[in-house]
Amino acid sequence: MKYETVIGLEVHVELATKSKIFCSCSAHSYGADPNAHVCPACCGMPGMLPVVNKRVVDYGMKAGLMLNCHINRTTTFDKKSYYYPDLPAAYQTTQWFAPVAVNGLVEIETSKGKKGVRIKQIHMEEDAGKLVHDIREDTTHVDFNRTSVPLIEIVSQPDLSSAEEVEAYLERLKTLLRFAKVAECEMAHGTMRCDVNLSVRPEGSDKLGVRAEMKNMNSIEAIKRAIEYETARHIDAIENGTEVLRQETRRWDDIKGKSYAMRTKETAGDYRYFPDPNVMPVVIDDEWFDSIKASLPELPEVKRARYTDEYGLSDYDAEQLTKSIALCECFEKAYEVCGNAKDVANWIISEAMSILNVRKMTYDMLDVDGKALGELINLVSGGKVSRVNGKKILSAMFDDPHIDPAKYAESNGYVVSNDTGLIEKVVAQVIAGDPKAVSDFKGGKEKALMSLFGRCMKELKGNCDPQVLRTILIDAINAL
Ligand code: ZN
Ligand code: MN
């Protein structure tokens, strides 16, 4: 018999807000001492009063709209009760009865074509703390820096059927949320975590099989391997009766390449969801809703089409530039200043992106002001700064985003001199120093000219129009 795999995902995404979801503690504790960013509210002390961070609702709405959801204009928070040492209040404040966004759709594309994945809901909730196990002392410590860091959980319908589709879906979520500047979505940093719900059924059947859930998967590779392993395990159980499948939570061990039963799956009833009386319902009025709607970015594929149609860029250039919203914004601003799309694309793709690569920065981390880049491009294309020195200025702009390219060129001696007297003097010196290269060139060796040209340019510190230098150099040799 042929089988199909049925997969639904619950994806937790850490929102890129400055502070936590219900208090003003910093949501970013990377490198901080344990428990340095905590207060009575996020530690769940009795009598504390949580206050909803408006920015979290902004981001929840943005995520919902990016994923084509309906936004609940009155959205409420609920308590999800469970006991675990990393959850100091013994309940998580999350959304159950009226999540911020419901009924969405995400389109993905795989080798099999396009497909829609339905989104059941997106809810806002707080993260739990971290347990730090000390093997030497045989103790466990609790770090509450991460408690109440804002998350959204994106719950899909069971519309995915292969590892390839899961990968395409996660990539699409990442792109949409990053373009909306809602979240970083980096599995390796823990800012995107994924629970995989999987079952297997005979192909064509509309009844769902017994479901296993694998929690907190943290790499796409591990997810793919786990999906393949689980699919095989389920088919084996159905066909050969190797085990009785139960609805359960399983742990994926990526080193062993196996999954293990952890506990039988709890149902919603086990969590005793009930409205959190401490958190007021959030009412999203028209003004708020409209302002969020107006702030949404153009989708990357819309930008790509516009870059080729409107600016005449090649498909390749448009593809490269739309790899992050930061690249797009830099491109669009620089274009406004200098008006030459192809030039801007070249500067971003061959210069800025390679600096990002060398510095091991992501394309989202580009922090160069597009307006300043446009001015720099004007300096270079206007012959005021050589391309070589232009690159040096760009590199400096990475270190200090406030640099004014024209002033920087001036104060660092990067302005092309039109002083032909100086150029002639340097040319004369270089020629006199290498009679062999001169006679080689006169004997027809083009390469010899390039070597003389290079030395002159070096003497002039690159501050010379190459065409002017070339003409003066050839004239000087011919005059010998
Ligand atoms: Zn706090
Ligand atoms: Mn959750």
Image (cartoon, helix red, strand yellow):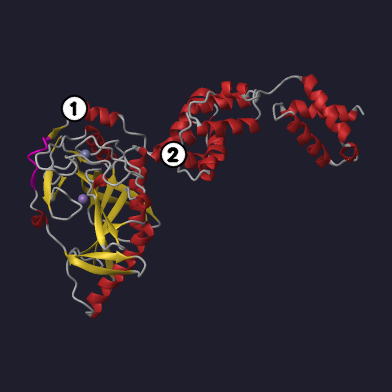
Above or below residue 10? Residue 361 is above
Q: Toward which corner of the image does residue 473 lie, by quadrant?
A: top right
**Is 169 displayed left or right of 383 in the figure?**
left
**Is 329 displayed left or right of 95 in the figure?**
right
Q: Which mark is residue 324?
A: none
Residue 217 or residue 29, whichever sits in front: 29
Q: Position of residue 390 (x, y in %)?
A: 61, 30
The crowding category of the residue bearing disc 2, from other C-alpha atoms within 10 Å (few below 14, some 14 to 19, many at least 20), is few
Can residue 215 be seen here? The reply is yes
Q: Toward which corner of the image does residue 376 lie, by quadrant?
A: top right
* Residue stretch in magenta: 274-281
Residue at the spot of label 1: 286
Q: Is residue 276 magenta?
A: yes
Does ligand 1 reach within 8 Å of label 2's beta carbon? no
Q: Is residue 91 magenta?
A: no
**Is 259 displayed left or right of 447 in the figure?**
left
Of helix, strand and loop, which one carries label 2? helix
Q: Position of residue 36 (x, y in %)?
A: 28, 42
Above or below residue 11? Residue 60 is above
Q: Position of residue 443 (x, y in %)?
A: 91, 40
Residue 385 or residue 286, whichever sits in front: 385
Of helix, strand and loop, which one carries label 1? helix
First along the sequence among labels 1 and 2: 1
Residue at the spot of label 2: 365
The amino acid type found where label 2 is placed reads Met
Give the main secondary structure of the magenta stretch: loop
Residue 14 or residue 141, whichever sits in front: 141
Q: Which residue occupies 17% across, 31% down? A: 284
Q: Which residue occupies 13% across, 41% down? A: 77
* Quadrant of image for the N terminus: bottom left
Most extreme residue toward the right is 480
| Nearer mark to the viewer, of 1 and 2 | 2
